[in-house]
Image (tube, helix red, strand yellow):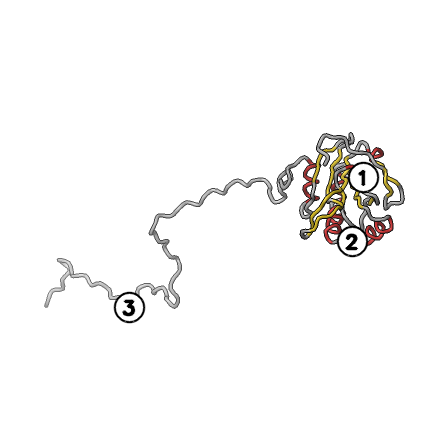
Amino acid sequence: MLEPGEPAPDFRLPASTGQEIALADLRGRHVVLYFYPKDETPGCTREACDFRDRLVKLRSLGAEVLGVSKDSLDSHLGFARNHGLAFPLLSDPDNRVARAYGAFGEKVLYGRRFLGTIRSTFLIDPQGRIEGVWSPVKVDGHVDAVLSRLSGRPAGAPSAGPSRRQGKKRAPRPAAPRERAGARKPSTRRKAGSRKPAKGRSAAGRKAPTARTAPTAGTARTRR
């Protein structure tokens, strides 16, 4: 298996785009070269669709995606058409390129040993050297790991920059003055049905008695 820093083996293979593609023709760009066992199998279909769904992002980071298997060009054409794959699929019928990258060898499936394609991905830098290796590949989360490597972030790390929901921090509002514990606010409302007593009348409705003053000296009436 190739290691990071080693030169990536060159190749020229027929592609589903109708032309031959050589690694040397892609100098100056990153290349995501992934090997998979067979068209239209469940795991290979999920992996291809994951690359399809992230293709715009991968290309925005300066990377080209190439899928490689031993399937024929006719098989590749049907596979690409059925799933809307917009990147080239290369045909490696004798596994020559897969062997050069260490992506072909002994596998174990359900306890049975056999030779076949080992699901593997190689990130090749613009100078044609191996920058990253994933082998054997677990499909779930694999394309995210490749994107993280291309963007220089650790796998699973959140993207830099504030979230949309994080705006400017608002200044805290001044706290309202606290009331003394147990204090009751005076009510300004009268109870329902109560009426303000009329002037000069008691609350019971009777006329309030007028106070009588005792006669002062000198004002008493003399009896005749």
Image mark for residue 151: none
Q: CA distance from mark 1 to mark 2?
A: 21 Å
Image mark for residue 207: 3
Is 29 or 45 nearer to us in this picture? 45
Q: Secondary structure at mark 1?
A: helix
The x, y position of residue 49, in whole percent, is: 75, 50
Tell me how many marks there are: 3
Is 147 or 124 nearer to us in this picture? 124
Q: Amino acid at mark 1?
A: Val
Name above or below for residue 213 compared with residue 54: below
Q: Amino acid at mark 3?
A: Lys
To which residue does mark 2 refer?
40
At horizontal 75% and vertical 46% (from top left) the residue drawn is 115
At horizontal 34% and vertical 51% (from top left) the residue drawn is 183
At horizontal 79% and vertical 34% (from top left) the residue drawn is 9
Q: Which mark is first along the chain, 2 or 3?
A: 2
